[in-house]
Amino acid sequence: MAKDALMDYDKALELFEPVLGFEVHVELNTKTKMFSHAPNGFGSDANTNVSPVCLGLPGALPVVNEQAVRYSISLGLALGCSIAPSSRFARKNYFYPDLAKNYQISQYDEPIAFGGSVDVELPNGRLVTVSIERAHMEEDAGKLTHVGGSTGRIQGAEYSLVDYNRAGVPLVEIVTDIIYGAEADAPELAKAYVATIRDIVTSLGISDAKMERGNLRCDANISLRPRTPEGEPPAPLGTRTETKNVNSLRSVERAIRYEIQRQAAILADGGTITQETRHWHEDTGRTSAGRPKSDADDYRYFPEPDLLPVQPSLELIEELRAALPEPPAARRRRLKAEWGFTDLEFQDVVNGGLLVEISETVAAGASPAAARKWWTGEISRVANVQGVEASALVSPGNVAALAGLVEDGTLTDKLARQVLEGVIAGEGTPQEVVDARGLAVVSDDGALIAAIDDALASQPDVLAKIRDGKVQAAGAVIGAVMKAMKGQADAARVRELVLERANS
Amino acid sequence: MSEISEEQVAHLANLARIALTPQEISSLTTELDQIVDSIAKVQQVATPDVPATSHPVPLANVFRPDVVGETLTIEEALKNAPEQADNRFKVSAILGEEQ
């Protein structure tokens, strides 16, 4: 892949205004597919979760999953959208073997939800309201594996293998209006927006929302337009690209930053942007050209004749509205107050995506301060080193148990970190690791005093200094005792006892 | 007379993956032109107070409960596959139109 020229990010922002738009696909966690009673499951053997509808066999008729409609309405309401009194499905026609029918059932001119907005909080504290154009129901496509060629990508592949298990899984596609004014925060806004959508669908319980599994997928549209002198009308919108295959929050941010730098370099060099999809490559941190973007006309949308309109009653809409959980933004404000964190501490938690973990740790009995300290500190550090999510390392219950052992004096902070390491390594609960590794603090004063007396006897000069009132000299003795105890003693208690023994 | 061009017909044929000879494109252009003209007559009577109809039966909200039903066996699922490998449908590598 040829390397694209990139412009310095700050320079790009000086010359151009980034204009954004996002399409987020949310896979619903219904038991069955959108239009078929085949199971909606992840990780099954290839082509085992399929029915004649999923394979587009002749005579098969799709029937709408009622739960998927309810979930879609709930999501629409949570996005502040209006729910259409009547919406219908449409066929989007294209030829690609990820769907056996040669069309995808989607919604086109009559989506189920439209006209909402979402408040997105950026790491720097800025609040951006993103307008939602629409949220519509559709079916997911099957999964292709490209075989042959050196890279496993489609370029150079000899053939492709298709698994239709995912074909027909219910999706809601959330489309934003054009987002102006993100400016230098564009990459952070992209990440924070997708995180906010993830929070919303998680709180609704309608999707597993795991980006690495493709439950939540973001297509990021971005274009640049040259800045115009003050007082002059803004330049027309530039040509946009749509970056796909971004399947982590971090990638969303990186992909937007990359596209800004790439497009700016082309434009500044007098070139033009090709309207196309771009594929994000996690390994290289670059995007590469995909297909030219088709016009909507080329999909030859028309109303799906096999399905009837969806006309939710006002009663149903109000029932679902009443059942909505606390919106994530309101929940954040409430938790911040309840936990008594400073702005900075709370921002740390939010940026680390650790709200749920800390809530659950507090619910399991830890103090908010201890829960925050463990999650944003040692656990995040290890997660970073291992390149995994903090939540994958240890359960909130175990973190609460660990905090409890520090609280009651069984462990020092230093020992607790060793215990955490054991828990992460799968050695059991904190108590089990303490027992198995024999890590508890030595709280038996008898054992400590014996070690202290030994240390004082071997360092008579130190003893003399302490007796002369040079209390700081005690450090050498404390160090020797801690070493003798293999670190498993409370240093403050040792110090107390050293002074007591020296002066006795 | 509407304005269907030969280029549009060729484009449509390409989208529909139908190979047409220049003669076929030419005759289809004429035919499609006539069809569009005929349909345009409907527009003359379809005033704004006539709602668009996509279905002849005035029904809505035909739903299915979210309950798992019978699925095909892997043998049944792959029965019509022109080619298969590894319990999957084998297709030629196609570049270009992934959704």
Image: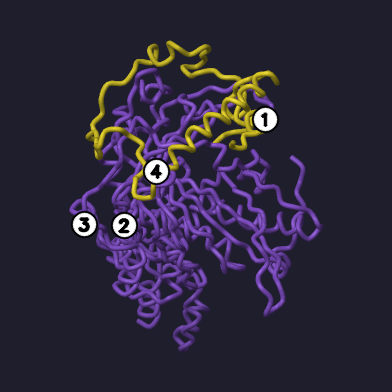
Chain colours: A purple, B yellow
Residue that carries the numbered disc 2 in the rendered image: A77
Answer whether labels 3 and 4 touch (C-beta < 8 Å): no
Precedes in sequence: disc 1 or disc 4: 1
Nearest to the eye among marks 4 and 2: give it: 4
Q: Locate the N terminus of chain A and report the quarter of the image it occupies.
A: top right
Precedes in sequence: disc 3 or disc 2: 2
Label 3 to label 1: alpha-carbon separation: 53 Å
**Are the residues under marks 3 and 4 on the same chain?**
no
Q: Could you say whether the residue bearing mark 4 is in a helix, strand or loop?
A: loop
In percent of the image, x 40 and y 42: which residue is there? Answer: B45
The three-letter code of the residue at mark 1 reads: Glu
The three-letter code of the residue at mark 4 reads: Ala
Extreme residue in the right direction: A269
Answer whether labels 4 and 2 touch (C-beta < 8 Å): no
Residue that carries the numbered disc 4 in the rendered image: B46
In the rendered structure, the answer to whether residue A360 lies left or right of residue A46 reads left
Q: How many marks?
A: 4
Tell me if mark 2 has few (under 14), some (14-19) or many (20+) residues whose alpha carbon lies within 10 angstroms of its own. many
Q: Residue A299 location in percent, x, y?
A: 53, 37
The three-letter code of the residue at mark 2 reads: Leu
Of residue A106 and residue A464, the one placed in the foreground of this image is A106
Residue that carries the numbered disc 3 in the rendered image: A318
Nearest to the eye among marks 1 and 2: give it: 1
Label 3 to label 4: alpha-carbon separation: 35 Å
In percent of the image, x 58 and y 31: which residue is there? Answer: B33
Q: Could you say whether the residue bearing mark 2 is in a helix, strand or loop?
A: helix
* Residue B6 circle label: 1
Of residue A313 and residue A347, the one placed in the foreground of this image is A313
Nearest to the eye among marks 3 and 1: give it: 1
Of residue A101 and residue A122, the one placed in the foreground of this image is A101
Q: Locate the C terminus of chain A and report the quarter of the image it occupies.
A: bottom left
